[in-house]
Image: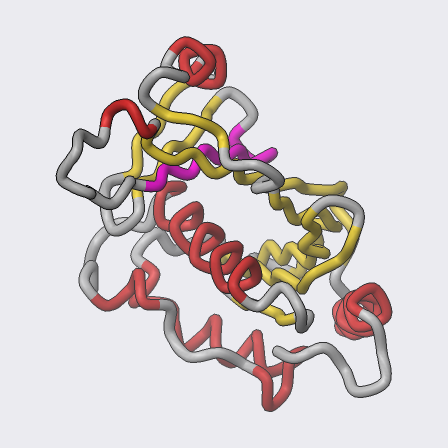
Amino acid sequence: MPVAEGKSVQQTVELLTRKLETLGAEKQGTFCVDCETYHTAASTLGSQGQAGKLMYVMHNSEYPLSCFALFENGPCLIADTNFDVLMVKLKGFFQSAKASKIETRGTRYQYCDFLVKVGTVTMGPSARGISVEVEYGPCVVASDCWNLLLEFLQSFLGSHTPGAPAVFGNRHDAVYGPADTMVQYMELFNKIRKQQQVPVAGIR
């Protein structure tokens, strides 16, 4: 969903949250998802001009005791929060990319069986985009409730309602888990990093 014409990122977030409150959604606290990018240390690449690999270390306030490590086009490792300490010890293999921290913060809303999180994505001090996450509590197989999610999204996003996330494509009947959510946040953050000059929005 694009930033509303003539509005800032924050003003667009406020418009979305007002629409949710008009529907009857109730505030249920706040949330935060952050991501730091690490790249393969030069000393481990060898002399063949190999391309370095990227790893994204992420945290989600919904899972306060977990840390997520996602590799580009690869697996998602779920570890405990001490993983951050391990990354310091692995600095000979993975180095933190400069100014790579990106996060989304915002408000959680409950509307019947739906949990909605609307956040402002920031890099450093500036707002770069909008995140919208919607979860339907009673269902754990996302493809089984996608039509219901879509109808709910249309009630407050209108014509800006997204298509099914790519993560659904190859796991049609699989149980949806925290790693699936983090993959979508990683994709959103990477999209925003690539389009730093223009505020964009991503919707899950």
Q: Is residue 35 above or below residue 42?
A: below
Furthest toward the front, the residue is 47
Q: Percent position (x, y) of residue 40? A: 32, 32
The quarter of the picture where residue 166 lies is: bottom left
Q: Percent position (x, y) of residue 199? A: 68, 70
* Residue 60 within the segment the image draws in magenta: yes
Find the magenta span and give its range.
54-63
Q: Percent position (x, y) of residue 2? A: 65, 79
For residue 110, say whether it is visible: no
* Residue 18 within the segment the image draws in magenta: no
Furthest toward the bottom, the residue is 159
Front position in the image: 99 or 77: 99
The residue positioned 53% from the left and 33% from the top of the image is 59
Q: Is residue 161 above or below residue 116?
A: below
The secondary structure making up most of the magenta span is: strand
Front position in the image: 153 or 81: 81
